[in-house]
Amino acid sequence: MLTEDYRQIFLRGIPMMDLRAPVEFAQGAFPGAVNLPLMSDEERAKVGTCYKQQGQEAAIKLGHQLVSGSIRAQRMAAWAEFVRQHPDGVLYCFRGGLRSQTVQRWLHEAGIDYPRVIGGYKAMRTFLIETIEQAATECQLVVVGGMTGTGKTDVITRLDHAIDLEGLANHRGSAFGKRSTPQPTNIEFENRIAIDLLRKRDAGHQQFVLEDESRAIGSCSLPLHAAMQTAPLVWLEDSFENRVERILRDYVVSQLDDHIALHGTEQGFERYAEQLLKSLAGITKRLGGERYQRLHAIMQEALAQQRDSGEVARHRDWIAGLLHEYYDPMYAFQRQSKGERIVFAGEQQAVVEFLRERARSGIA
């Protein structure tokens, strides 16, 4: 049983048994794939060394020796259980070669027939890269920009035809954007974008709204960045007071809640406070020494107040200071430099309605 219908695998979210070694899986995987390797990292390294020194036949023989007896029985049980839980799934290795062929044959000998992906991980990964490239050239992109705190992500989440780049990268996209849980690898980030584009195009969307981003969102490089630089720009506006409150909600209140949910009250607060202070330190050079020291002192006071009483009012002071003295001048320059691309400007509801109507009318 073979399949190379990569499109349907990703459109339908078909369960995937990834037989690559853990080190390969950690470098990049598909969403929802389960790593049930034929060989451990150590076993794979030994077989690789044997292949280089003695050739393929000796390497295959060593692989069968390493994965035999109780080890083979244990791994067979895990593969059989995956098949039992996911009878509609597929299995693959890196290139659809010996590893996946071996496991498929062993399962068949045990009375289990399970589809193997032709070309394996590499072919599916190539398909997803091409999906991004095709979308960049065939689809209409619209970018949402605006000052820090205007709620660009809020606009993105309200639109069926938007790609939530920051959500897919698990990062809010600024110096303070790191979340309480890790980011995906760059490969995984690209895979997530490709699958989102594939599914939305299959649903009939040919225009996509994306938030204005730099070349990287945290540690994830943005594959659509070049195409976004020439796309029409919609500029989101809001009052200074609303922006401060939104930043307070996202970067203080919600961030602390996330850390506490993961690490408990005491350790969660420590990690949250450490991350906030580290984020400010990360832009020391751009702020300048005096400004950094002043904002750092305010932030420390705000954290002490929050720890003692739960009160977050003092955080508004460093947020307002950063907006006035750092972010707003930078974004004002960006708006001026990108002015000829701006096709609409307004507050959140007006922007959402404009983008929905633009998609309905098919305006490029």
Image: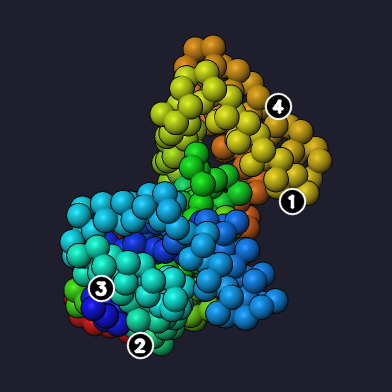
At 67% from the left and 38% from the top, the residue drawn is 278
Q: Label 3 to label 1, Cα distance in Å?
A: 54 Å
Q: Are marks 1 and 2 in contact (CB under 8 Å)?
A: no
Image position, residue 153 (x, y; %): 39, 54
Q: Secondary structure at mark 4?
A: helix
Residue 132 or 157: which is nearer the viewer? 132
Quarter that holds the C terminus: bottom left
Q: Is residue 166 above or below residue 243?
A: below
Give the label, 3 or 2, closer to the camera.
3
Disc number at residue 115?
3
Three-letter code, disc 2:
Glu
Above/below status of 60 relative to 17: below
Report whether 96 appears left or right of 63: left
| Tag 3 secondary structure | loop
Taking the spot 20% from the left edge, 54% from the top edge, the residue there is 84
**Mark 2 closeness class: few <14, some 14–19, many ≥20 residues within 10 Å:** few
CB under 8 Å between discs 4 and 2: no
Instruction: Please indicate whether residue 330 sits to the left or right of residue 152 in the image.
Output: right
Compared to residue 147, the image places residue 189 above or below, namely below
Q: Which residue is mark 2?
A: 138
Q: Earlier in the sequence, mark 4 or mark 1?
A: 1
Q: Which residue is mark 4?
A: 297
Tag 3 and tag 2, C-beta contact below 8 Å: no
Above or below for 2 versus 316: below
- The residue where tag 1 is placed is 286
- Mark 3 and mark 2: Cα distance apart in space: 32 Å
Secondary structure type for disc 2: helix
Q: Measure the C-alpha gap from mark 1 to mark 2.
A: 38 Å
Q: Earlier in the sequence, mark 3 or mark 2?
A: 3
Q: Residue at x 45, y 44 (%)?
A: 243
Q: Earlier in the sequence, mark 3 or mark 4?
A: 3
Mark 3 or 4: the one toward you: 3
